[in-house]
Amino acid sequence: MRHRGPWGEAFRQGRSWICASIWAPIGGATVGVGLLCASAATNAPAPSPTRSGSPDPAPTTALAWPQWRGPLATGVSPTAQPPVAWSETRNVRWKLPLPGKGHSSPIILGDRVIVMTAAPVGEAQKPVFDQAPGVHDSVPVTHRHEYAVQSVSRKDGRVAWKTIVREEWPHEGGHSTGSPESHSPVTDGQAVYALFGSRGLYCLEADGRIRWRKDLGRMNTLHAHGEGSSPVVRGGLLVVNWDHEGGSFIQAFDARTGDSKWKTARDEKTSWSTPIVVEVDGKPQVIVSATRRIRGYDLATGALVWECAGLTDNVVASPVVHQGVLVAGNSYYVQTMLALRLSGARGDVSDSDRVVWRMNRLTPYVASPLLYDDTLYHLRHNQNVLVRLDPATGRLRGELLRLEGIRDFIFASPVGAAGRIYLTGRDGTTVVLKHPSGREAFENAVLAVNRLEDSFSASPALVDRELYLRGERFLYCLAE
């Protein structure tokens, strides 16, 4: 294991970060919405002028972006004021070349952007093609890869540190539209947790040093299409879902020590969805969408609380919760979406009155839904068509909205802030729409159509007046 770059990170320069878990009451459930993080002056002496490449004082940030769907796990930042318009020559504070091809989404820890990478190293070898049953559209493996976590200054795009956690020959090449690193990191404000799947699970200190590591085994994905589910951290526990074409399980680790707290077997095939944590009837649950069942587990013990059938193969999108109702969907062989009232859910609720609505058209696939106030926004499959509906009833709000200007699939999940919605396509185009307030007529006017010279599949991160886009070649900081 190798570590590069200066240490110190977000906890130097006479400031510390005070972080606490936030639970927001939403109807019958309480959503674990991440971290409240604020910088606070310490009794340390005033810092001397920093040299080039050393950390800057951490900005005061009311709500960070600690995970790939933001502090609320809905895609929304309640405090960010990101720019509306940009191009390669406008409102780009900096852009940083990234090694390899990665779809891992960036997160924010204090004055740093944290991003995971997988880059080919050494000379190209004879291509090795995937041999999994049903494999198609696969990329052959030609190189060893270097798997790393990078911490980047929000101010100027300098790499503060880079920790290489592993180097190896990947056992799967993945889908042609995928990447060798699609998991996203997560932070509790104290450490960074990076799941590299078959390459291991790592806890890194804020200065990049590895605190602990775990080898979870080898994941063999459906059609060898690659890995991508991200971990979730809550209440001192780090939870990893491990669905593949083998022995699937969900496991919780002590976030501080890495000790296993519980491990529960799952009757599942490959899924790519990231778990969420919500509080239901006074107790936190881990909820995972997957092929055979959507399931809720007791966060403290890993015991199965409830399960509900209704989704189909290749579940990628993560669910959201609105006023105690969980909404989950997918779109592969069959289009399906359902809403489930969480309070009182016990056992198999597939055919019970806990299911409040279902729909079998216009459902999401790769991109997860955006829950903004009382409106659910999601893409029809991977297309440039936006569906808007009432999460309480499943009724559509307005006609389908075609996102003119995006000419390729959309894999990045939409995000929202400051009364705006941001949708980014693989062709480098981001359409910015107006999100109406409760007093306005429901209309998503187009505010801007922005283009960058890169391809984007990772979801954006929003904080303060900045928007971060991780492309297949560059990491962009967009700010007026």
Image: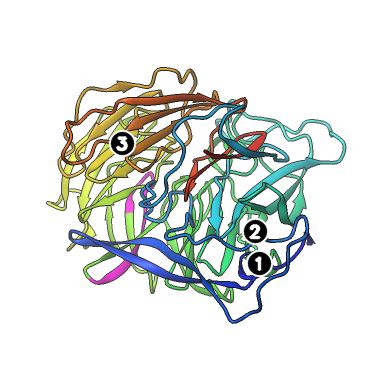
How far is mark 1 from mark 2, CA to CA?
7 Å
Q: Residue furthest bottom?
A: 43
- Under mark 2, the amino acid is Gly
> What residue sits 16% from the left and 39% below the top?
439
Question: Can residue 361 be seen in the rendering of this structure?
Answer: yes
The residue beneath circle 1 is: 213
Residue 358 x %, y %: 20, 38
The residue beneath circle 2 is: 200
Task: For marks 2 and 3, give the one nearer the viewer.
Answer: 3
Q: To which quarter of the image does residue 118 belong?
A: top right
Task: For marks 3 and 1, give the one nearer the viewer.
Answer: 3
Q: To which quarter of the image does residue 13 belong?
A: bottom right
Horizontal side of 128 relative to 363 (left or right) equals: right
The residue beneath circle 3 is: 377
> What residue sits 62% from the left and 29% below the top?
138
- Under mark 3, the amino acid is Tyr
**Magenta region:** 282-294
Label 3 environment density (alpha carbons within 10 Å; few <14, some 14–19, many ≥20): many
- Under mark 1, the amino acid is Arg
Label 2 environment density (alpha carbons within 10 Å; few <14, some 14–19, many ≥20): some
